[in-house]
Amino acid sequence: MEYLDIVLMFLKAFAVGGLICTAAQVVINLTDLTSGKILVIFMLGGIALTALGLYQPLVEFAGAGATVPISGFGYLLANGAMKGAERGLFGALTGSLAAASAGVSAAIVFSFLMSLFFKSHTKHN
């Protein structure tokens, strides 16, 4: 792989990820929605786009630029459920959990480890 290909890959990931984050920032600025509601909307958007077959081409084009934002988590859940559905109803219900288990487990373990090293405190202005 040439350096130009690597730079192009980074630029595509940055552009797509940046557009997703820009869309989220616009929603934050123009609405009174809470951040939790916005996260759910973007995750469900990733699920809907995956169900329509529109998110996979975006992942192939941008790589981590499409899989790292919260909409990528929706894509991961939907992909796992669709692959699990090949094994039946139970597979459809557990497929998304199996697909996301490594990332969720890593987040829990690293959060616990960081809590051992750092103490939280209230920020005073």
Image: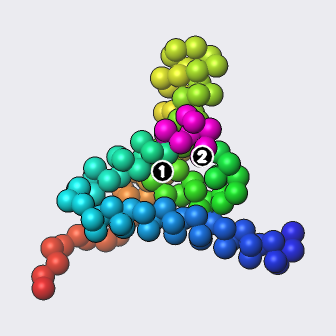
Question: What residue sits 23% from the left and 70% below the top?
Answer: 120
Mark 2 or mark 1: whose residue is earlier in sequence: 2
Question: Where is residue 83, by image quadrant?
Answer: top right
Q: Amino acid at mark 1?
A: Ser
Q: Amino acid at mark 2?
A: Tyr
* Residue 54 part of the magenta segment: yes
Q: Is residue 109 above or below residue 84?
A: below
Question: Where is residue 13, by image quadrant?
Answer: bottom right
Span of residues in magenta: 47-55
Question: Where is residue 44, by image quadrant?
Answer: top left
Mark 1: secondary structure: helix
Q: Residues within 10 Å of mark 2 (few under 14, many from 20)?
A: many
Q: Residue furthest top?
A: 88
Do tag 2 and tag 1 residues touch (Cβ < 8 Å)? Answer: yes
Question: What residue sits 87% from the left and 69% below the top?
Answer: 1
Q: What is the number of the mark on residue 71?
A: 1
Q: Residues within 10 Å of mark 1 (few under 14, many from 20)?
A: many
Mark 2: secondary structure: helix
Foreground of the two, 52 or 99? 52
Residue 40 horizontal side relative to residue 104, left or right? left
Question: What residue sits 20% from the left and 59% below the top?
Answer: 32
Residue that numbered label 2 is attached to: 55
